[in-house]
Amino acid sequence: MRSHLLNGLTAEHYRSSVTEGVERVAAKLATTDRPFTGVAVDALTPRVDAIDLDAPLGDTTAVLDELEDVYLKDAVYFHHPRYLAHLNCPVVIPAVLGEAVLSAVNSSLDTWDQSAGATLIERKLIDWTARRIGLGPAADGVFTSGGTQSNLQALLLAREEAKTDSVANLRIFASEVSHFSVQKSAKLLGLGQDAVVPVPVGHDKRLQTVALARELERCVQDGLVPMAVVATAGTTDFGSIDPLPEIAGLCAQYGVWLHVDAAYGCGLLASLKYRDRIAGIEHADSVTVDYHKSFFQPVSSSAVLVKDAATLRHATYHAEYLNPRRMTQERIPNQVDKSLQTTRRFDALKLWMTLRVMGADGIGQLFDEVCDLAAEGWQLLAADPRFDVVVAPSLSTLVFRYIPSAVTDPAETDRANLYARKALFASGDAVVAGTKVGGRHYLKFTLLNPETTTADIAAVLDLIAGHAEQYLGESLDRAS
Ligand SMILES: *Cc1c(COP(=O)(O)O)cnc(C)c1O
């Protein structure tokens, strides 16, 4: 069994084993002709159930064969140009190489004595990101597991900075289409049920600053304490970007913490063409960035940045065994002092490899391409009488629905769109997402693959229309 431990004696086993795995995936990538096989839960479950975890196969090749059957064959492949559903990106090769290196060396980023150079690399990437945002000389931050954790940590800092004797009085303002992790964070932070005040958005799905101003004023009038405003730079559903400069102005006026959730929109930090769309982000007290959404990084790779490094002390605890107080005096950089996590992956290495091989412009170009693709997709949809499209894209998302010409009942249109999404998924020809707009069912393309073409978009729209028509035809049959 010792032969399975990765060390100096087993380096050759490591090389052949990992290479074998890489060969499988490479073969898969080269031959995948659909984003999904359409496998049903009921078909896949027994295959997984049948495997006896207490009866190991011992041999890598046999295990990879088995994995083919329970996972690789039927996985959902984000690299396929007709995967258009959620905020998942195809990943860049330098980052995947970074992933292989970081898991083999297995540094842990909680303390210097478990990471050394890895800590310095992470810190340099935090500084790089903070500079791109424009947070100023006192900025800092830390890598996290994802936008959810970044939002939680940012709001923890905001709560600790808020001036109040009672957390029950604290209020967070976020647009009605902000990410649900804001509400989840409020709950985890022990705030009241009504702590998150939803602020209405306009037709463009951007927070209305007039409404925000009204809510802030009302909050103060009611003797409550505005704790934070969460501005979303790239909403999950629409890619819409809240008006950051105006929101920053209101935050300054009311002395409120401004958190910018740029989990999705952070790709613009590298953009060569559209950086101005997130102008104003530099006013934030904290920012969430998800490199695993718009920097083409494998999950997980995310960070929370703060304008004032000192605020990170609210996440600091000293453990004698790990990061005793004296280490701070000795200026030993222990990243655990800034993190909600203890043992923590060296995810930063993926971004490091990416920037060293491709440069920020390389990432920015890819993200610009998907933004341009979305603009072309918008033109297609706007010109197509079969579809209603919600809002012109600010990033790379399109929300639309099929409108049957002969149907007047909106509930029937809902059902046709729901059916089309499900049927498409079951066919495996393409994967699209869905959401609700004004209580009605819509479909969603999140375009993050520069390999997707307008021809792909047109073809998937035809498939959707075909499935919806089939549903309506059958529904007519049912009625007669
Ligand atoms: C995806 C997303 C999050 C959550 O990020 P995870 O990495 O999935 O935890 C938060 N906010 C926005 C706007 C997002 O799109």
Image (cartoon, rainbow, N blue to C red):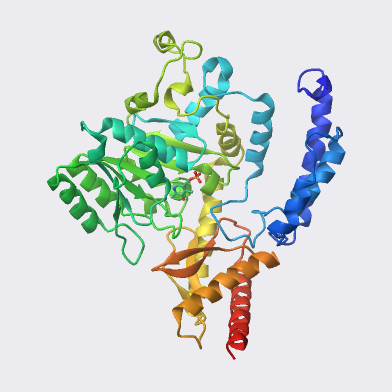
Which residue lies at the image location 47% right of the left edge and 36% below the top edge?
303
Q: Is residue 449 left or right of residue 259?
A: right
* Rendered location of residue 216, percent (x, y): 20, 49
User: Is the residue 232 above or below the residue 155 in the image?
Assistant: below
Q: Is residue 460 left or right of residue 290?
A: right
Which residue lies at the image location 17% right of the left edge and 44% below the top edge?
253
User: Is the residue 456 above or below the residue 309 in the image?
Assistant: below
- In this view, the residue in front, 18 or 379, is 18
* Rendered location of residue 439, percent (x, y): 41, 68
Which residue lies at the image location 45% right of the left edge and 82% below the top edge?
409
Q: Quadrant of the N terminus?
A: top right
Q: Quadrant of the C terminus?
A: bottom right
**Can residue 131 be seen from the camera position used here?**
no
- In this view, the residue in front, 190 or 100, is 190
User: Is the residue 387 above or below the residue 114 in the image?
Assistant: below
* Rendered location of residue 30, percent (x, y): 77, 54
Quarter of the image where one finds residue 420: bottom right
Outermost residue toward the left in this view: 221
- In this view, the residue in front, 427 or 243, is 427
